[in-house]
Amino acid sequence: MTATTRDTMTNSTATAASPEARTAAFYELEPHHHPEGASTMLGFWIYLMSDCLIFAMLFAAYGVLGGNFAAGPGPKDLFELPLIAVNTAMLLFSSITYGFAMLVMEKGKVRATQGWLLVTAVFGASFLAIELYEFSHLIHEGAGPWRSGFLTAFFSLVGTHGLHVTFGLIWLFTLVVQLSKKGLTPANQRRLQCLSLFWHFLDVIWIGVFTFVYLMGML
Amino acid sequence: MSDHSTPHAEDHHDDHGAGHGTMRDYVIGFLLSVILTAIPFWLVMTNAIADKATTAIVIMAFAIVQIVVHMIYFLHMNTKSNNGWTVMALIFTIIIVVIALSGSLWVMHHLNTNMMPMPHDMGQLP
């Protein structure tokens, strides 16, 4: 807003109606200016916290239903810990390679950022592939989500996490294309930071999954 | 307007958004995560501790420590980002999660243990 428009605005409010002008003094007439995207990170963090609540409810459902096998197979018959260990490693590697992407992003290197993002995508896709293999294996054995309360809760919890990883990958590929079209603009840097939070957050949820579902199921 | 809002925007700029990590942060976080993941897997796969309840408590403790490590080294949590609102939102979420999880498990456990035994022959009921 230029100085002349501000002057005309104050003139018009002063001359129009003096009682209204007095009431308006309680409000901030000038629109409070925030730099673009200043509150994005806080807003995205609050979204992540609400996502955390979704996972908390799924964990609670698994905790309640996890023992209802309906005379079907239990965790010890179904889970293969070496596979889960490989899966966990994939997600951990993808976390640190995303960290490397953020580091080269701060130095302004577009190509290197895209490269590390694609490495992250490879690890994320391997995680998803292993998880889908596990799911198809379970369903093939007749241990699908319809088999028992335990399996329903298991597929809901782990499936929701896998769905989040899938959307994270779609977002990641979108940003790789965005970077090649527009470069490291402030908006793109903000988007990369949001995806960084999202990606590391999914790793945090996975810690809960492999501890409570897989490791404690095998005890 | 721009002339009076610019200094306001600049002095707020430093504490907006998440913090930035360094290479050292990511490497330390990664190494700690690998160790904190490998030990619980090793404990369960080799049955290193005979008592199952002890193993469960130990691997849960490792999970909590690893979550804190991720929060600090990967998510760059600190009490100053966004003037403390990030941490406030996190504390609020943790309180809700603890209430929901412990409440659900507690109530349903009591329901399971205190419920009247069901008659096996439902067909003979009037």
Image (cartoon, coloured by chain):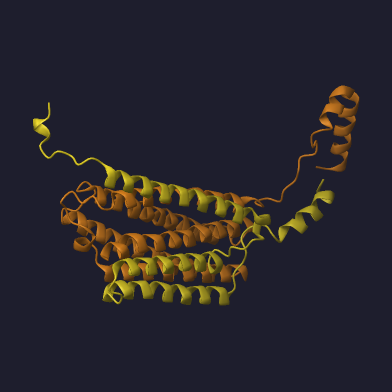
Chain colours: A orange, B yellow
Whether residue A29 is situated above or below residue B3 in the rendered picture: above
Image quarter where the N terminus of chain B lies is top right
Residue A163 position within the rendered picture, expressed as x and y whole percent measured from the top left: 37, 52
The residue sitting at 44% across, 63% down in the picture is A203
For residue B52, side relative to residue A118 (left or right)? left
Pick whichever, B40 or B77, lies toward us: B40
Pick whichever, A219 or A125, lies toward us: A219
Image quarter where the C terminus of chain B lies is top left
Pick whichever, A10 or A28, lies toward us: A28
Q: Residue B114 falls in which quadrant of the image?
A: top left
For residue A25, side relative to residue A97 (left or right)? right
Pick whichever, A65 or A122, lies toward us: A65
Whether residue A9 is situated above or below residue A179 in the rendered picture: above
Residue A29 position within the rendered picture, expressed as x and y whole percent measured from the top left: 80, 35
Residue A191 position within the rendered picture, expressed as x and y whole percent measured from the top left: 56, 56
Whether residue A126 is situated above or below residue A17 in the rendered picture: below
Q: Is residue A181 visible?
A: no
Q: Is residue A71 visible?
A: yes
